[in-house]
Image: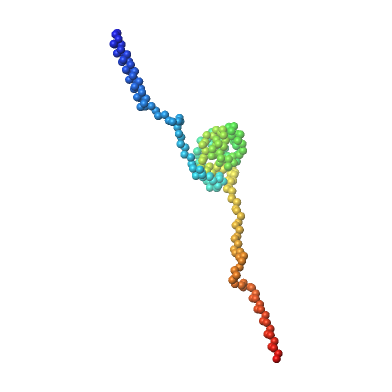
Amino acid sequence: MDSFELNKILGAVLGTLLITLSLNIVAGAMFSPHKPEKPGYDIVVTEPPAGGGTTAPQEEPIEQLLAKATPDKGASIAKKCLACHDFAKGGPNKVGPNLYGIVNRDRATHEGFSYTAAMKGKGGKWTIQDLNTYLISPRAFVPGTSMAFAGISKGSDRADLIAYLNTLADNPAPLPTAPVPAQGAAPKPQDTQAAAPKDEPKNAPPAQNAQPAKPAPTPAPAPAPKH
């Protein structure tokens, strides 16, 4: 191979390398990503104006809700519990214990049911107030309970269900009543008599009961001169 052919081969290789390098530079300039000035992403969080946020309406106390509760509606709501509980007197335990006589019953005491350690450690009775709190969120009221129930958020539904559960007893307990607000003191009657003015006007007419002023005595006539 002479030097001319070798030069042609080297020139071709060098030209190929130059073309490849040029294409790489052009492609990098065209498709290079835009780098932000600072790393990360800006997350915009819209905060409510101070003092202008809306608050959730306060729910009525359970005593007031029970005053309007209907056990028949509670029986319909209780149908969603039939998969885990039985409501009949002397009925069997299912996934959960039998609920006949649940109101004011000691917790974790129904015969034949295996309660969790969390429920056994809770203690106390199933009062109306505790049943209401438990039905909002069982796992929040008894952390560690095995009851997989999301809870009942609507207060009137809980009141209807509790009113129905209260009927499931030989002697249903009286439902609590809403406390009567204390009455304030009766307003004091306003004084209808106007205060007397401190200074009477100079030209004011005399009072009706005032005594008339006595006239001044007439002077006696002077004696006649003697002649």
Nearer the observer, 171 or 198 = 198
Q: Which residue lies most toward the top here?
A: 1
Q: Which residue lies most toward the right here?
A: 226
When asked about the image quadrant of residue 172, the answer is top right
* Residue drawn where x is 29% and y is 8% of the image: 2
Say how many tags the image has.
Answer: 0
Query: Could you tell me residue 43's position as x and y percent?
Result: 46, 35
The N terminus appears in which quarter of the rendering?
A: top left
Query: Could you tell me residue 113's position as x and y percent?
Result: 58, 33
Query: Could you tell me residue 89's position as x and y percent?
Result: 56, 39
Horizontal side of residue 183 vs 41, given as left or right: right
The C terminus appears in which quarter of the rendering?
A: bottom right
* Residue drawn where x is 57% and y is 37% of the image: 141
Picture layout, residue 185 above or below residue 119 = below
Nearer the observer, 73 or 217 = 217
Nearer the observer, 21 or 157 = 21
For the rendered model, the colour scheme is rainbow
Query: Could you tell me residue 205's position as x and y percent?
Result: 59, 72
* Residue drawn where x is 42% and y is 29% of the image: 35
When asked about the image quadrant of residue 15, the answer is top left
* Residue drawn where x is 56% and y is 33% of the image: 144
Horizontal side of residue 184 vs 25, given as left or right: right
